[in-house]
Amino acid sequence: MSGQPACPFGAGEPALSVRQPWAGWIAAGAKTVENRSRPTGYRGPVWLHASAAQDLAAEPPPTAVNVALQPRALTRGAVLGLVELTGVHFDRGCCAPWGQPDRWHWQLRCMRLLDAPWPARGALGLWRPDLSATAPAGYPEDLLTQLAAGRAVVVRRPGLGWAWPAELAGIRKRYIGRPSALCNPLRIGPGWPRERVLAGYAAYFAGRPDLQKVARGLGGWALECCCWPLPCHGDVLAAVANAAEVGR
């Protein structure tokens, strides 16, 4: 596999099964390297799946021992959330303390946990989960509470493995992805990781008083984008909208 999917989270991105307790340390943000016997050309969002099997011989670094006590380190046979695969290289005595010798190091970051683990059977290598019937909701659990309080909330665009339930059909929604007027003109790509793109958008937004005016009026709206639950330019729009709501 190669390249990046056009839209993360539901647009066909793969899943990666990792045995516990390693999956729990990745979910906690402590483990940023996954050791594999083979490389992959894929870069981009990946579902982190905790395998049903457990690595009973796991010997994590001493600094990570306490992480294993967290609930997500005990979950097995379920997707825990989304992680971004940013690079792959063969061991060169690097990536301490997680990198193992003579293995391919898959570099991970930007973990976002699901509100609740999503039960699923895993597979070897990168595999494609079936999102048609069991995809988790594309919005936070307290969405209605936040909207009722006049807050703007970034959600996942429907049609990418899920649909709005009937009880949420009447909420105010605005699409902020491409090619809308509120989209991020910068794209993730070689030399432009997500963090750099988002920093660039923040600078771009700071020079656009017209967009700032629109953002201040988005309180109480669900902002639909393809990125959720990864960090998104919608977070900038929501922050401005929510600051304006507090000031009223």
Image (cartoon, helix red, strand yellow):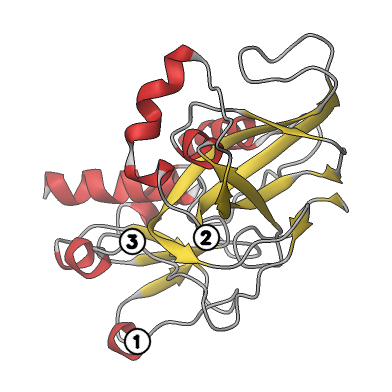
**One can see residue 5 in this view:** no
> Tag 3: Cα neighbours inside 10 Å, few (<14), some, or many (≥20)?
some
Label 2: element kind: loop
| Residue with the most extreme bottom position | 166
Label 3: element kind: loop
Picture disc at residue 216:
none
Q: Are marks 3 and 2 in contact (CB under 8 Å)?
A: no
**Res 126 quadrant in image:** bottom right
Work out how far the residue at label 3 is from the one at label 2, CA to CA, in angstroms.
22 Å
Foreground of the two, 76 or 247: 76
Whichever of callouts 3 and 1 sits on the residue coming sooner in the sequence is: 3
Say which residue appears at 65% left-offset and 75% top-offset. Answer: 130
Say which residue appears at 23% left-offset and 43% top-offset. Answer: 243
Q: Identity of the amino acid at label 2?
A: Gly
- The answer to whether residue 139 is above or below residue 62 is below
Whichever of callouts 2 and 1 sits on the residue coming sooner in the sequence is: 2
Say which residue appears at 65% left-offset and 12% top-offset. Answer: 96
Q: Are marks 3 and 1 in contact (CB under 8 Å)?
A: no
Q: Which residue is mark 2?
A: 77
- The answer to whether residue 169 is above or below residue 137 is below
Q: Identity of the amino acid at label 1?
A: Ala
Label 1: element kind: loop
Whichever of callouts 3 and 2 sits on the residue coming sooner in the sequence is: 2
**Res 52 quadrant in image:** bottom right
